[in-house]
Amino acid sequence: MDAYPSNSANRLYSEDDPLLLFASSDSAMARAERAINASGLRVGARLPIERASERLAVQAKASAVWIEVDGDCGPVADKVLRQVSKDASEGRYVAVVSATVDLLDAVTAAVEATEVELIVDANDVERTAALATVTAGLGSSLQVRDVGSDNNAERLRQLSEEVSRIASTLARLSTGPGAPVRAIEQSASGDAPPLSVEIVRSVIRARRLRARYFHEELFADPAWDMLLDLLQAEIAQLRVPVSSLCIAAAVPATTALRWLKTMVSQGLFHRRADPHDGRRVFVELAPEASQALRRYFAEVGPVAVI
């Protein structure tokens, strides 16, 4: 494990609630610090992830916690992530967890709280945006500088617009324009119409085929792509881990995780722990979402669904 200077690790700011930074390596620490410094935030302590639980146990107050992992630290990291997830859900502090894509399943299995901002293989601007998102309401003790004059301000605005678009689109999944909020409509019998896995797979293949002729971003629709992938898996009696679902979404992993978080909170997806692997979580369609999709395919009939 990489070491960090003791004078840096022991820096405390008793006058305010600090941001605590924990990382799995020197390079991970440097990446996180670039984003924090660019945001104008104050760091109270910088520690290797092995010391995170010890520090959190004695830290009276903190405004935010950043965890940067670029390697599999096993049970040590799992314990810290679960602790931070619990603390964030209880409002003790806000948190950002930044990980590499190969750690996606292990991280999402440990972090269940929607209050934690998860970013994957993020660049410096995306890290800064994540900090701006979680610290927006913290007040004066942990301030982000005005990003309007930043060279990356336009990118930050785009990320903010993306989050707003996700929220608006997901709201329309359950509410039409001007319609009251309602649950997904149930069929009279409660039975879903029959649907073959070949039909769903053909739709998925057709959607992917568009990328041969047009840029993928023109057709980015992660909510629909994830719904289709989970429907296909359900019919084929397969289980879908978080990492596979993020790939199916055909957008960057961080964006896919935001959609997944919101789809779970909307009751469209369910998370299921893998009974054979505590470091993996499966995602499946909620029964109501499954029936709605099957009724949709039945109503559309032979018309191409893309």
Image (cartoon, rainbow, N blue to C red):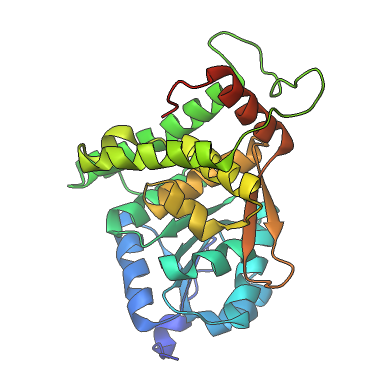
- Residue visible at 43% across and 54% down? 247
- Residue visible at 72% across and 29% down? 192
- Residue visible at 41% across and 54% down? 253
- The answer to whether 190 is drawn above or below residue 195 in the figure is above
- The answer to whether 134 is drawn above or below residue 9 in the figure is above
Where the C terminus falls, by quadrant? top left
Residue 41, by quadrant, is: bottom left
Q: In the displayed structure, does residue 178 sit left or right of residue 159?
A: right
In the image, farthest residue toward the right = 189
Counting from the top left corner in percent of width and height, residue 132 is at 41, 47
- Residue visible at 66% across and 35% down? 290
Where the N terminus falls, by quadrant? bottom left
Q: Is residue 37 visible?
A: yes
Q: Nearer the viewer, residue 291 or 254?
A: 291
Q: Nearer the viewer, residue 222 or 168?
A: 222
Q: In the displayed structure, does residue 189 sit left or right of residue 20?
A: right
Q: Nearer the viewer, residue 105 or 295?
A: 295
**For the image shown, how many numbered marks are present on the structure?**
0
In the image, farthest residue toward the top = 178
Counting from the top left corner in percent of width and height, residue 19 is at 49, 64
Q: Is residue 61 visible?
A: no
Q: In the displayed structure, does residue 113 sit left or right of residue 35?
A: right
Counting from the top left corner in percent of width and height, residue 62 is at 58, 62
Counting from the top left corner in percent of width and height, residue 288 is at 71, 32
